[in-house]
Image (cartoon, grey):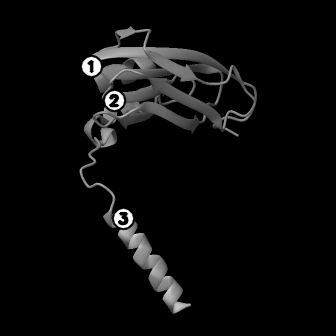
Amino acid sequence: MNRRNFLGLGLGAAAVAMVPMNLSAIDFRATKPAAWTAKKVDAAMTELFGTTATTASGVKLKAPDIAENGAVIPVSVSSDLAGKTVAIFQDANPEATVVVFTVPAGGIIDYSIRIKMMKTGTVTAVVNVDGKLHSDAKLVKVTKGGCGG
């Protein structure tokens, strides 16, 4: 049993040692705290990107038309653009910002998450490409559940 533990830990340590150490992500909660407490999507976008002007192209947002359970709504965002930052916002909860991703150079934008929404609202995905914002939005109708139960 001890030998198995030793081999398992040794293989785990070897795998961790092989992970590239040049990954760098921006901690948006620390650098842009007002974006996480903003109540409106426009205010959160302004805090995060400095503007709300977006082009409705180049981004594909997938979310259900009707979410039977507001506690687990699958959302995915993809784009062929060479973006540096991807953000997802919603207007149904008290805080508008859901998540912000830092895209590494040459990275592919194809993210999937599950979000909570307490009521029907619009989900917006924004991709920052060299200071120019591209977006897509979708109305998601929540029938039950959500953040409140």
Q: CA distance from mark 1 to mark 2?
A: 13 Å
Q: Amino acid at mark 3?
A: Val
Q: In the displayed structure, does residue 7 sit left or right of residue 65?
A: left
Residue at (32, 24) in percent of width and height = 82
Q: Nearer the viewer, mark 3 or mark 1?
A: 3
145 is higher (above) or lower (below) than 125: below
Residue 89: percent from left, percent from top: 47, 25
Q: Quadrant of residue 65?
A: top right
Sooner in the amino-acid sequence: mark 3 or mark 1: 3
Q: Nearer the viewer, mark 2 or mark 3?
A: 3
Mark 2: which secondary structure?
Answer: strand
Residue 15: percent from left, percent from top: 39, 65
User: Can residue 89 be seen by looking at this rendering?
Assistant: yes
Which residue carries the number 2 mark?
Answer: 85
Residue at (36, 65) in percent of width and height = 16
Q: Quadrant of residue 66?
A: top right
Mark 1: which secondary structure?
Answer: loop
Give the camera-side residue of 115 and 147: 115
Q: Amino acid at mark 2?
A: Thr
Residue 100: percent from left, percent from top: 39, 34
Sooner in the amino-acid sequence: mark 1 or mark 2: 1
Which numbered tag is attached to residue 16? 3
Which numbered tag is attached to residue 50? 1
